Amino acid sequence: MNAMKKLIYALTLLLIPVLLAGCDSKLIVFDPKGPIARSLTDLIVYSIILMLVIVVVVFVLFGYIVWKYRARKDDGDFEPEEEKGNHLLEITWFTIPVLIVIALMIPTTKTIYEVEDVPQGYEEEEPLVIHVTSADWKWIFSYPDQDIETVNYINIPEDHPVQFKMTSAGTMQSFWVPELAGQKYTMANMQTKLYMVADQPGSYYGRNTNFNGRGYAHMEFEVQAQTREDFNKWVNDVKNTANELTEDTYSQILEPGLLGRMTFNGTHLDWIDHAHGGSEQYIDPEKYQIPHGEHDDIYQEIDENREGDSTEQDTEDHEHNHEELEDSESETTDHSHH
């Protein structure tokens, strides 16, 4: 009876993740929209199937052995003969784990090297280069060739390779767009690279997956894949109407806090690349201090400011936005929707 209760308890624990996964009608990590994400999804599915086969075999053997060698009333004083070991069995249970590791290692290594380069079929195309700078708690995207900078959103052309050169202005964060590419960390004073291709136009969800403080839960961004004509039109619109990015404005953007979408002409790469150091010129450690007793107030402020953060009004409500940021945002937010 106790064994049955333990079995039911174990099955319940196993079912909890499955039931919770059903809370979202769509697991976007299993809905790839690009060749790199598709390779990663295939690897995940392969790994899950392989592990399920292993689990099923182990549980079947476990049940069979428990049943076959269970204690019985007619056993009496039966004592099994002493055995010194079985070399065949020892070789078998050593070899099987090695084969399992090899079966996981080969496709994993192959996929890792595959996604670290331009996807197959796009080798002849020049990638669009976008510099990614993570800050607390926003994402800054710089287009050096177009001389444009955006905050909390990216526009990219469809069916064209994009290379992200990523760093951080402060704490370590994790860049992830599950429908288009894998996850990779952004770290201060160094640069990581990530390739991405979107098969078709659409809006794709991206976020930080590495806990980095009180604003972590709201550190999200949008990837908008557009036709090449729409992308070029967006670039021209920004050139004609967006404000110029100044170093003072950039310093204010880096202050810890939440922001809506913003668009500028010019990039911060003109005066600093955080991959090569210099972030300490813009980071004030005192702004990260939380006085005793203000913990709840800070969380309440974040929740209130985050609601509808892509609108002009909400961006103006953030206490960390200074007057110059509000003026810039009011004229540039609309560029994110072209």
Image (cartoon, rainbow, N blue to C red):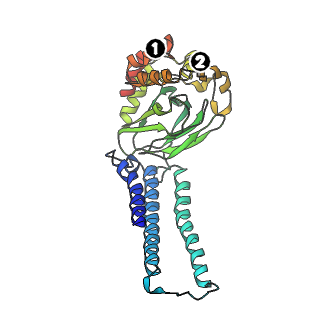
Residue drawn at (52%, 62%), measured in percent from left and top?
A: 107
Q: Against 229, is 86 above or below? A: below
Tell me residue 212's x, y (percent): 56, 34
Residue type at mark 1: give it: Glu
In the displayed structure image, the side of residue 44 where residue 279 appears, left or right: right
Nearer to me, 181 or 268: 181
Residue drawn at (53%, 24%), measured in percent from left and top?
A: 295
Tell me residue 207's x, y (percent): 46, 37
Q: Which residue is mark 1?
A: 326
Does the CB distance between marks 1 and 2 fall below 8 Å? Answer: no
Q: Against 298, is 34 above or below? A: below
Q: Quadrant of residue 223?
A: top left
Local crowd at mark 1 within 10 Å, few (<14), some, or many (≥20)? Answer: some
The residue mark sitting in front, 1 or 2, is: 1
Q: Regarding mark 2 in the picture, which secondary structure is present there?
A: helix
Q: Regarding mark 1 in the picture, which secondary structure is present there?
A: helix
Tell me residue 188's x, y (percent): 64, 34
Tell me residue 170's x, y (percent): 61, 30
